[in-house]
Amino acid sequence: MYKNEPKTLKKKKNNIKRKAKRKTHSDVPPVQPLQMALNSLSRRASSTLLPLAIRAAGSPRTIHRAVSAALCVEKRCLGHDLGSQGYFLSSRFSTAAAEKPSADYSLIRVLESEIECAVKPNDVEDVPDGFPFEIQDNPGERTILLKRKYLDEIIKVEVDMPNTGTEEDGHDEAEDEDNESNVPPSLPMVVSISKGNGQCLEFGITAFADEITIDSLSIKSPESSEDQLSYEGPDFNDLDENLQKHFHKYLEIRGITPSASNFLLEYMNNKDNREYLQWLKNLKNFVEK
């Protein structure tokens, strides 16, 4: 039967096979427009990030390394740009912070004017003949120290800045200004006379021109501490007048004389001018920095 199959039947079977093949090819759906767009974007991104040599690489591992290298380059470029911008911003802020306010310049001008008007101190102090003390004068300190030896005693005198006037309680300002010109300048001084046993006799005195007054006296022991309230005797003016005279004589023999107080008044006035001038200069230098 099959061997003698008519030609008409064979043609029908061939036609059916060709139609089946055409149907198989036509069943494959066409590429969608969205997928085509995505593919196009992917190709553009790869062409932007990767050089032609990397796109030509066939291994996926090679492509992955190339992409990482390209991203690192992009990060470095971005970091450099941001760093440059940050540098310029910080430099602008630092320049603005370094500028002095106008009030500082005004203060500097006032200090310069005060320096010009300040009394200029003498360069050298002429120590009078017969002045028995060695003078220790440290710049920047308000006091000086006088030292000498007398017999078995060591005498030290601490001299403070001069007082140019005092104000009394219960007076108005106008009266105080009138009285200031009548108050002579004076020097507060502390005289310490020590011997080998460690004890010292301490006088609190005030030196005027051609006059020395004793304000207090006491015995200081090395065993006594500053926290202890030692008995220091009565007020000096309450002592017997004859005793007061002998204590004045006791100090004169040891070099605390009216002539010494005259020299010390001039010396400390000059030191006051010198320290004040240097103080103004130090202030000006600090503000200018």
Image (cartoon, helix red, strand yellow):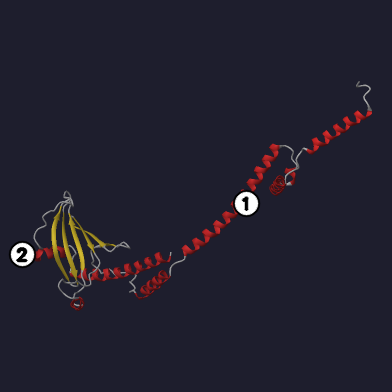
Indicate the quadrant containing the N terminus: top left, top right, bottom left or bottom right: top right
Few, some or many residues within 10 Å of mark 2 (<14, 14–19, 20+): few
Picture residue at 40% right of the left edge, 66% below the top: 287
Identify whether 166 is placed above or below 74: below
Between 93 and 63, the one lying in front of the other is: 63
Q: Amino acid at mark 1?
A: Cys
**Residue 23 occupies quadrant:** top right
User: At which x and y percent is residue 121?
Assistant: 33, 71
Q: Between label 2 and label 1, give the one nearer the viewer.
A: 1
User: At which x and y percent is residue 284?
Assistant: 39, 68
Between 18 and 216, the one lying in front of the other is: 18
Between 137 and 59, the one lying in front of the other is: 59
Q: Amino acid at mark 2?
A: Asp
**Residue 153 occupies quadrant:** bottom left
Query: Left or right of 275: which side holds 198?
Result: left
**Circle 2: element type:** loop
Query: Left or right of 13: which side holds 223?
Result: left
Q: Which mark is residue 209?
A: none
User: At which x and y percent is residue 233?
Assistant: 9, 58
User: At which x and y percent is residue 58?
Assistant: 74, 38
Few, some or many residues within 10 Å of mark 1 (<14, 14–19, 20+): few
Q: Which residue is mark 2?
A: 240
Inter-mark Cα distance, 2 to 1: 97 Å
Q: Which residue is mark 1?
A: 77
Between 207 and 278, the one lying in front of the other is: 278
**Circle 1: element type:** helix
Picture residue at 70% right of the left edge, 37% below the top: 60
Indicate the quadrant containing the C terminus: top left, top right, bottom left or bottom right: bottom left
Q: Earlier in the sequence, mark 2 or mark 1?
A: 1
